[in-house]
Amino acid sequence: MKTANLNKVFTAFFILACFALEAQEFPDRVWHRASPEEAKAWQNPKAQAFQEYLIDSTKITGLMIVHKGKVIFEYGDLEELSYIASCRKSVLSMLYGPYVEDGTIRLNKTIKELGIDDVEGILPIEQTATVQDIISARSGVYHPEGYPGGMQEYAPKRGSVKPGSYWLYSNWDFNVAGYIFEKETGRNIYDEVERQLANPLHMQDWDRSVQQKEGNTSISKYLAYPMWFSTRDMARLGLLMLNKGKWKDVQVLSESWVNEMLKSRTSHEELNRNVPVFQGTGINYGYGYMWWLWQAVDDPRFEGAYSAKGAMGQNITVYPAIETVLAFKTKAIYGRRNSSSVRLKVAQKAAEIFDDTLK
């Protein structure tokens, strides 16, 4: 492709502004935009192909790519608040940190000690599950979930699994994790999102008033805690994670807790064996504390990557190897939905634009 045509592509698909080159930046109230010099590694025909893929093959309503703290690429509506589905679980994991570290939440505490029961009862073996088992999706408790979204169709028979020994993505675990957080801390999850994350990160669109819990308490006592974010505020969460919990000069989350969240609690081999939905997709997911971990990657750009993922097409993916954050959303009330395959391809294609030889 000739230089003139390349320039046309870059003008159409990249945000170009003049800012001083820095190793890492953070937005204030408004995101900073990458200069042409800073965007060099992203200026290639794959950018146009990615844009065309989003338009022709996805139903994504908003997407951002951030490199070294500056916006490289944007698509759709970045401001509108909408439901982020299971990305909520990764956000909750972030909130746990300070309270685990100060001893308010004890990860070795059992659900029996916490007095947790449910509509259909909790079996004696299930009562030995710990808080750590819960936030790792390894509780071994297969009580029906009062808010859909888990993978209980793959669950073993109740009482057949020792807590901590078997991974299953279950909304019962995740909803109980929310209950435990509030019970042990005496604080509301949404208030803590505002205090721990929205305010320190100067989120542009966070609205506490629209956040509310949901669930069918005739099935399970434990409500889900759906969250509504904008795409650009989801990207702030990703940037905080990329920088090991540090925002500018403030350690918002401790680096040690970020490392704990991202430590593999379930290998991709076990995950694929227990729930084979990701086999053959090109991404080998392991699992940490409510974060999906990219394992056994064959592209160095994916090394150490991890994701918060939600139904229909909600995603925050962090690529430490290339200092990049991807955030995208699909607004549910529009009736738009992306297949699991499409969501995975978007997360792969976004990072594949980056070409270090162009810098």
Image: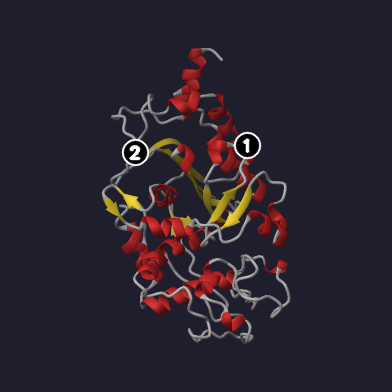
**150 and 135: which one is in front?**
135
Query: Where residue 40 sits in the image (x, y, percent)?
Result: 43, 25
Q: State whether residue 215 is above or below residue 259.
A: below
| Kind of residue indicated by mark 2 | Gln
| Kind of residue indicated by mark 1 | Asp
Relative placement, left or right, of 214 versus 195 is right
Neighbour class for label 2 at 10 Å: few (<14), some, many (≥20)?
few
Query: Where residue 262 sits in the image (x, y, percent)?
Result: 49, 56
Residue at 71% of width from left, 78% of height from top? 160
**235 and 280: which one is in front?**
280
Report the Cα–Cα distance between label 1 and label 2: 33 Å
Residue at 61% of width from left, 35% of height from top? 53
The image quadrant of residue 198 is bottom left
Q: State whether residue 90 is above or below residue 57.
A: below
- Residue 56's tag is 1
Would residue 218 be seen by someone viewing this image from the given angle? no
Q: State whether residue 207 is above or below residue 336.
A: below
Between disc 1 and disc 2, the foreground one is: 2
Query: Where residue 186 sits in the image (x, y, percent)?
Result: 36, 78
Residue at 48% of width from left, 22% of height from top? 358
- Residue 24's tag is 2
Would residue 274 be seen by someone viewing this image from the given angle? yes
